[in-house]
Image (cartoon, grey):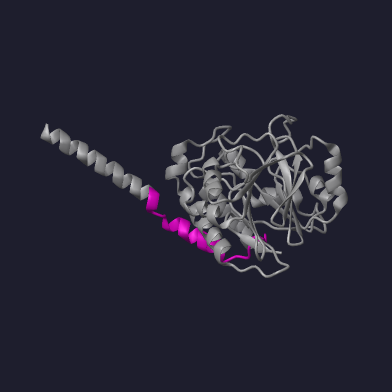
Amino acid sequence: MKRKYIYDLIIIVFLGLTFLYFQFYTPRSAIKLSQRIDETQAGNYDSDRITLSKKYETYLAKWLPKGDKTPTIGHYYIGQQRKLLDLRIEKAIDEVKTIVIPTRKVRIWSLLNMGVVVKTHDKIISIDTANIPFVSIAHNELTSIADIFLVTHADADHYDRQLLAEALKNKKTIIFPEGFYFTGEDNNPNIYKLKSGQRTNIDGIYVTAFKTDHRGDGNFQIPNCWFLIEVDGFKILHTGDGLAFQNPTESQYLRDRRDIDIMLTNLMLSDENIRNIKPNVAVPLHLFKYIHSREQLKESTFESAIAKYDQKISGIDMKMLFAGEGFEY
């Protein structure tokens, strides 16, 4: 019996050490690739950045399934990709906390998929910032430093209930589209659910929601939206995973404005969609979708975005960002 207990103890210790290894060890390859990204000009897509993006894609592609399959939860936990993305997100959150933004300037960081953080000289806005399973502890610091959280829809890479629940504990404001179900917190005065076309003012941050379908599915019953954010004189449009508008007059309203500074666009939108809005800057997001299949990752690279938009959105500055990168406007 004693020998059996020793074997059990050995197994427990082995599993514990394995857990600690995957939790805290960062491969040198991840550190070097992250450093190489930091040595390039964020937002640029010259030949050096394109070459680097291919290495980045290869790194994220390891162990990804082919076809329509998605990775298992184990992939998120033990994959080398998690450590690389953890480094990238940790860097971004550290910059959000420490970089001072001058007046009449705004800085935007790309996190994961459509997740972004917007910072002006005195406001921090978090949009669709979901901590994809086991990616980054640093990500959760947003609950104490952001002023307001926006969620376009309930997909797990856009909506992080645990993160938002912690934000509410810290008296932060959360904005959803109308009809969004957020368990047990619907009576919280810091939660807003905007009807399509409704504009609200949260301490000088103006937010308008525009109801859309999800990825062109034609379903307007499930809450999905674009958000127009107006803060400190800047107008920023975030498209979530929306494609078609329920109310075409709202789409026309955005096209007629001609004053959008920055459009944070999902890769499903066509070059015509961007030209219709005619922002000063377009930022393709949902890049490097490593939480999907290898094929979907391949379709969401710098090269795929360039092929879709470059030379087709003349007069609009396009910014290409790796996870954790930011640019100032």
Q: Is residue 262 left or right of residue 86?
A: right
Quadrant for the N terminus, please: top left
**Residue 240: x and y, percent?**
68, 43
**Residue 325: x and y, percent?**
60, 59
- Does residue 90 show up magenta in the picture? no
**Residue 141: x and y, percent?**
51, 55
- x 32%, y 45%: residue: 18
Q: Is residue 105 left or right of residue 99?
A: right
Quadrant for the C terminus, please: bottom right
**Residue 73: x and y, percent?**
46, 37
Q: Can residue 85 be spotted in the picture?
A: no
> Total of numbered circles in the picture?
0
Q: Is residue 314 above or below residue 244?
A: below
- x 68%, y 34%: residue: 179
Q: Is residue 162 above or below residue 140?
A: above
Query: Residue 245 occupies which quadrant of the picture?
Result: top right
- Does residue 34 show up magenta in the picture? yes
Q: Can residue 112 be spotted in the picture?
A: yes
Q: What span is colored magenta in the figure?
A: 23-47
Q: Foreground residue, 142 or 38?
A: 142
Task: Name the residue furthest left.
Answer: 2
- x 49%, y 54%: residue: 138
Q: Foreground residue, 198 or 128?
A: 198
Task: Name the residue furthest right.
Answer: 256
Query: Residue 267 occupies which quadrant of the picture?
Result: top right
